[in-house]
């Protein structure tokens, strides 16, 4: 693939900024730093399962989203990406008011797929979640 991460506009310029699902979950805006996508989130009540811990589905959504942005940056400029495989291992959790940091990096970008590794950590470096995903690249974007 000939595209690079620098060919794309910022996340603020992308239609993904209007992501109703992410807005409903109060997910943060993605940033791009040194070839990695990054999202920093403070745990709110909406993110909790009974017992006061972050729901695993919130972690899965956060990691899928940050990895999706990374895959999108590696795809051709007019392309969209769709998650076709997602694997997570959760080793710890977070509670109300704690901050979590999700990061992702593309490890393979081909003509039709991209593979991305990601993780979620606390600011002190404690590992909470690791994961990887494969994304299907749809050149020309999605048909509405």
Image: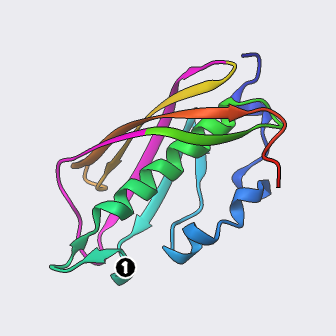
Q: Nearer the viewer, residue 51 or 126?
A: 51
What residue lies at 70% left-to-right and 62% top-to-bottom? 17
What residue lies at 38% left-to-right and 81% top-to-bottom? 46
Q: Nearer the viewer, residue 136 or 116?
A: 136
Residue 12: x and y, percent? 74, 58
Q: Nearer the viewer, residue 88 or 101?
A: 88
Q: Main secondary structure of the magenta part?
A: strand
Residue 27: x and y, percent? 51, 67
What residue lies at 54% left-to-right and 42% top-to-bottom? 83
Q: Residues within 10 Å of mark 1 (few under 14, many from 20)?
A: some
Which quadrant is the N terminus positioned in? top right
Residue 129: x and y, percent? 28, 47
> Quadrant of the rendered structure where residue 6 is?
top right
Q: Which residue is mark 1?
A: 44
The relative height of residue 126 versus residue 49 in the rendered view (above or below) is above
Position of 64 compared to 94: left or right? right
Region of the chain picked out in magenta, as a range? 86-110
Q: Find numbered disc 1 in the image and state the secondary structure of the residue it sits on.
A: loop
Residue 64 counted in the magenta span: no
Q: Nearer the viewer, residue 84 or 114?
A: 84
**Which residue reaches farthest front?**
144
**Which residue reaches farthest bottom?**
45
């Amino acid at each position: 693939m000939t595209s690079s991460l620098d060919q794309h506009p910022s996340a603020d310029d992308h239609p993904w900024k209007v992501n109703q699902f992410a807005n409903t979950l109060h997910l943060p805006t993605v940033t791009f730093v040194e070839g990695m996508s990054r999202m920093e989130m403070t745990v709110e009540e909406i993110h909790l399962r009974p017992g006061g811990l972050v729901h695993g589905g919130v972690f899965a959504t956060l990691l899928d989203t940050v990895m999706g942005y990374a895959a999108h940056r590696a795809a051709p400029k007019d392309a969209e990406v769709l998650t076709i495989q997602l694997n997570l291992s959760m080793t710890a959790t977070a509670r109300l008011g704690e901050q979590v940091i999700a990061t992702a990096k593309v490890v393979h970008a081909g003509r039709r797929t991209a593979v991305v590794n990601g993780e979620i950590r606390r600011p002190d470096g404690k590992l909470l979640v690791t994961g990887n995903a494969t994304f299907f690249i749809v050149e020309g974007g999605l048909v509405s």
